[in-house]
């Protein structure tokens, strides 16, 4: 049976191993301690208190945060990643965890630039920041944010949704993407409820003109005109600041959707279809997986490796 203990005890055991068995210098061990304390801070913020509960998604978010938030260069992040890999290899080898969550993490030199990805908790904070105190149009703002996160939509796509594109009985939205390609995107109950509340309680007051200025759009401005892409950015940015979140814009919601879906076990090609990517390689950057290590996965799981 795999032993489970809290993160601090696991770190202490690791340092004992480094000092006694690996024979590392005090300066090297101190550098490792600093790295693992930084990791502990991020894991605690995500509600994770034991190494056995750490997922590859937790580690990927932490590593990217070092570069994006702390400003570390890829070389420094690579050293930090080396500490994490050694720590989790030690825990697996000593039967403290069943699987090594760091095994498939990519190295910083392979990164492609991505906007910030919000954790599920921060995503919830963002959505809930669109409340009655945020302004008269809060129901529209919440519907907009819910739609973007529920379906991974681009700013231009959510702005272009028509009222008739929201298929309430089916729980889907007809989205028109790049090249005027259309796709049906299922959305969850919270997003459906937010859109219905907006349609029932706020949108009628915005449809006060009969000159066709609304173009049949779902999301309207205070003057009854369709929201423009720039307005979507402004709304998301304003609500994010109200939620106390930095560096958040519409693409952050799209990337968070994709990352959370894949971390939850969704099939890569399903996420590709939902995002409207023509090339699965574009979708694959969300997996944060070092492709050079995929052979080991095939060797382990395929019946004819």
Image (spheres, rainbow, N blue to C red):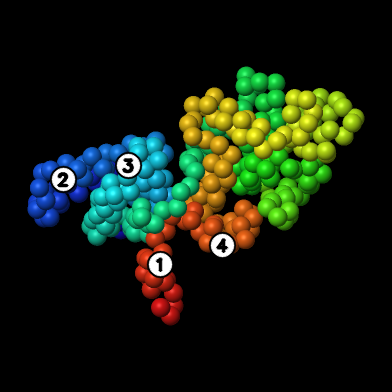
Q: CA distance from mark 2 to mark 1?
A: 31 Å
Q: Position of residue 47 (x, y in %)?
A: 40, 38
Q: Nearer the viewer, residue 247 or 10?
A: 247
Q: CA distance from mark 3 to mark 2?
A: 20 Å
Nearer the N terminus, badge 2 or badge 1? 2
Q: Position of residue 8 (x, y in %)?
A: 25, 40
**Residue found at the very far bottom of the displayed protein:** 304
Residue at (48% x, 47% y) in the render: 114
Q: Nearer the viewer, residue 122 or 246?
A: 246
Residue 294, disc: 1
Q: Residues within 10 Å of mark 4 (few under 14, many from 20)?
A: some
Residue at (51% x, 49% y) in the render: 259
Nearer the N terminus, badge 4 or badge 2? 2
Q: Which residue is mark 2?
A: 29
Nearer the N terminus, badge 3 or badge 1? 3
Q: Position of residue 283 (x, y in %)?
A: 54, 57
Q: CA distance from mark 1 to mark 4?
A: 16 Å
Q: Residues within 10 Å of mark 1 (few under 14, many from 20)?
A: few
Q: Which mark's residue is nearer the viewer, 3 or 1? A: 3
């Amino acid at each position: 049976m795999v032993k489970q203990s809290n993160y601090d005890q696991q770190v202490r055991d690791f340092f004992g191993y480094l000092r006694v068995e690996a024979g590392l210098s005090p300066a090297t061990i101190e550098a490792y301690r600093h790295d693992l304390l930084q990791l502990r801070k991020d894991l605690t913020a995500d509600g994770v208190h034991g190494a056995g509960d750490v997922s590859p998604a937790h580690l990927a978010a932490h590593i990217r945060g070092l570069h994006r938030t702390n400003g570390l260069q890829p070389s420094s992040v690579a050293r930090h990643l080396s500490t994490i890999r050694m720590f989790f290899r030690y825990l697996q080898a000593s039967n403290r965890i069943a699987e090594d969550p760091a095994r498939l993490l990519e190295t910083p030199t392979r990164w492609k630039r991505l906007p910030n990805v919000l954790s599920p908790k921060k995503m919830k904070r963002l959505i809930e920041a669109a409340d009655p105190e945020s302004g008269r149009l809060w129901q529209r703002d919440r519907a907009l944010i819910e739609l973007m996160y529920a379906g991974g939509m681009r700013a231009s796509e959510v702005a272009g949704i028509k009222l008739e594109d929201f298929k309430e009985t089916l729980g889907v939205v007809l989205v028109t993407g790049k090249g005027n390609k259309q796709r049906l995107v299922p959305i969850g109950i919270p997003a459906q409820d937010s859109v219905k509340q907006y349609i029932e309680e706020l949108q009628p007051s915005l449809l006060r003109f009969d000159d066709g200025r609304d173009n049949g759009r779902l999301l309207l401005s205070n003057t009854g005109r369709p929201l423009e892409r720039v307005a979507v950015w402004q709304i998301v940015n304003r609500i994010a600041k109200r939620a106390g979140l930095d560096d958040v814009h519409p693409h952050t919601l799209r990337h968070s959707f994709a990352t959370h879906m894949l971390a939850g076990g969704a099939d890569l090609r399903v996420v590709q279809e939902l995002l409207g990517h023509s090339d699965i390689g574009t979708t694959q950057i969300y997996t944060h997986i070092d492709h050079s290590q995929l052979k080991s996965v095939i060797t382990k799981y395929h019946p004819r490796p």
